[in-house]
Image (cartoon, grey):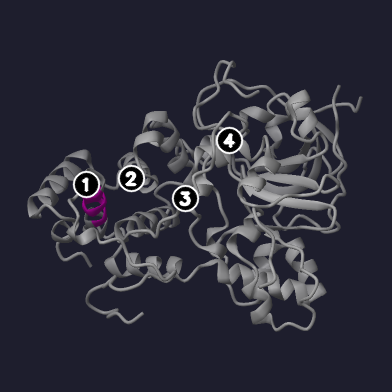
Amino acid sequence: MTVLPEVTPPPFQPPYPTQDARFAPGDTVRVRPGAAPGHMRTPWFLRGRTGRVERICGDFANPEELAYRRDGGPARAVYRVRFTMAEVWGDGAERAQDTIDAEIFEHWLEPADAP
Amino acid sequence: MPHDHHDHFHHEGMSPSGHPYRPDDDQPLTYWQRMEIAVRELLVEKGITTAAEINAQIERMDARSPALGASVVARAWDDPAFKQRLLADGSAAMEEIGIDPSGMKLVVVENTARVHNVVVCTLCSCYPRNLLGLPPDWYKTRAYRSRTVREPRAVLREFGLELPEDVRVQVHDSTADMRYLVLPRRPSGTEGWSAEALAGIVTRDCMIGVAVPQLP
Amino acid sequence: MTDDTGQGRRWHDMGGKDAGEIARGEHDFALWEKRVDALLCIATAKGYFTVDGLRRALEDMGEDAFETMTYYERWIASITQNMVEAGAFTIEELNARMEEVAARGPTYGEAQGAGE
């Protein structure tokens, strides 16, 4: 059972340019699984977890490509996604309603319906 | 700190934080130091950089310290409109008060009566260094990187900070380009304090989120 | 998930793993470490590689490197890896220079030569 955090979308625009972002603040999103080797910036502990978009950070080149001397384009949206500790750690959570935010690239996210 | 800029870069005496430099000069040369010297010399000889450029970068980094972050916090405490600009775009707000972000993308997160923020980089050691200076060793340890996203309250307890149950702890894992600064709550009893006095109670650890400002 | 039971989790991806007390010691950085830091800033500013490349090489060094090398030792190893990949200098050139540096003397002070 997914436990979702409350988010209050910020009252300002993203400070870095963004266009055609697929998700909006407040959207419920799931982090895709992924077990390939190589340089990735989506932490293992968040893969497969469901959270809410707290804000759009901006569009950025893909670090998975930049790490290997490629230009990482086209830039794609990075979102600050919020998860409850209950969602991430289950019964082992220190306090269920505490939250963890991370910046996740759009290609790691898929829409998830709220339960 | 007096030194001659022109011919040689003397790193004698005390570092900006008041500690003596480690006496490297007399220590046995390590394999990695050998590599650093070789790489640095090759890059200078090939015209990729210069000794002056390297020294200028060292000085630029030395000039960054938690005092800069504290001045940003003190300004936000006294100036609500600045605080809103800071929360909307941390880098632009820094620049407004004369601190060059040098490309750093700063996001400032605000502690409130209901929310306490703490920052970590589980994947490496991302840190708002262009504001606060170089991160402390503990921030880069396995234990901090592993535990802060899993048991932040236990971590904070180790740092001497106990938070009430009705406060939500919000952990930020710096996984992308943004760098995070915690804006601590202004303690009561500081009304009418000067900017210097306010900045004086804002420590580096407060801006990472493992401490809160204490009245002296 | 406290233990790595998954396939494909990389060693550096530490969030949530079991760990002990946080060692709270701090140290002021030595000149050679500040030089390493400066080289990273300069080389990335000039487009030889990115911080992503720095991280990728650090990760590829493996867990033993994290346990046995200091932070800036790993950084100079990663910078060197990235600069060789970028064609800034060759391994042959690096070899020759590292030998020459060692021959200058047994301490950092002597080995850095003019050390500007």
- Of residue B113 and residue C91, the one placed in the foreground of this image is B113
Query: In which quadrant is the C terminus of chain C drawn?
Result: bottom left
Q: Which residue is mark 3?
A: B137
Which residue type carries mark 4?
Answer: Ser
Query: In which quadrant is the N terminus of chain C drawn?
Result: top right
Residue A15 x %, y %: 72, 58
Check disc 2: other Cα within 10 Å, few if <14, some if 14-19, many if 20+: many
Q: Is residue A46 above or below residue B43?
A: above
Taken as a whole, is the magenta stretch helix, strand or loop?
helix
Q: Which residue is mark 1?
A: B30
Helix, strand, or loop for circle 3? helix
Which residue type carries mark 1?
Answer: Thr
Check disc 4: other Cα within 10 Å, few if <14, some if 14-19, many if 20+: many
Which residue type carries mark 3?
Answer: Asp
Mark earlier in primary sequence (4, 3): 3
Residue at 35% across / 45% down in the picture? C79
Q: Is residue C91 above or below residue C7?
A: below
Q: Which residue is mark 4?
A: B146
Q: Which residue is mark 2?
A: C73
Marks 4 and 2 sit apart, C-alpha to C-alpha, by 22 Å
> Which residue lies most toward the right here?
A115
Q: Tell me whether the residue at label 2 lies in contact with that at label 1, contact meaning CB atoms closer than 8 angstroms.
A: yes
Check disc 3: other Cα within 10 Å, few if <14, some if 14-19, many if 20+: some
Tag nearer the camera, 3 or 1: 3
| Chain identifier of the residue bearing label 3 in the image | B
Mark earlier in primary sequence (3, 1): 1
Query: Which residues are the magenta region?
Result: B33-40
